[in-house]
Image (cartoon, helix red, strand yellow):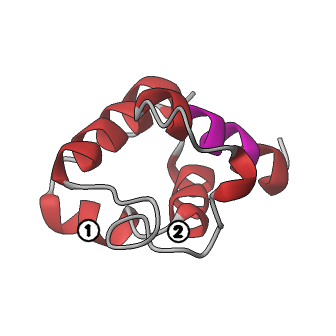
Amino acid sequence: MTTNELTLEFKNHLITYLNLLDISIDDIKDDEPLFGGDLGLDSIDSVELIVLLDREYGIKIKNPADGRQILVDVNTIVAYIEENRTK
């Protein structure tokens, strides 16, 4: 799977897991901060993102400090998935 394909797949999962019904893939910019940006994600959403990474990619984030470094934007998350996925 290419990086572009993974990015699109992740954005689809993001919309589904966070129930972002009024947002399309094109609305999510790859380099836009997920928290404090236009998406308006909060701490509960960060937990859902951790669950998403575990279920879809076999990635477990146990340390909150690691989560803050990984869950920055789509680009950062996709790069982390490419390096660490087990599924």
Residue 54 appears in which quarter of the rendering?
A: top left
Let me know if residue 9 is in the magenta part.
yes
Q: Along the line of sight, which residue is nearer the eye, 33 or 49?
A: 33
Looking at the picture, how far across and down is residue 80, in whole percent? 52, 59
Q: In the picture provided, is 26 more to the left or to the right than 21?
A: right
Q: In the picture provided, is 83 more to the left or to the right than 53?
A: right
Q: Is residue 61 above or below residue 29?
A: above
Q: Which residue is mark 2?
A: 76
Q: Is residue 64 above or below residue 62?
A: below
At label 2, the amino acid type is Thr
Residue visible at 26% across and 60% down in the picture: 67
Q: Main secondary structure of the magenta part?
A: helix
Secondary structure at badge 2 equals helix
At label 1, the amino acid type is Arg
**Residue 16 bears which disc, if any?**
none
Q: Which residue is mark 1?
A: 68
Query: The magenta stretch spans which residues?
Result: 8-13
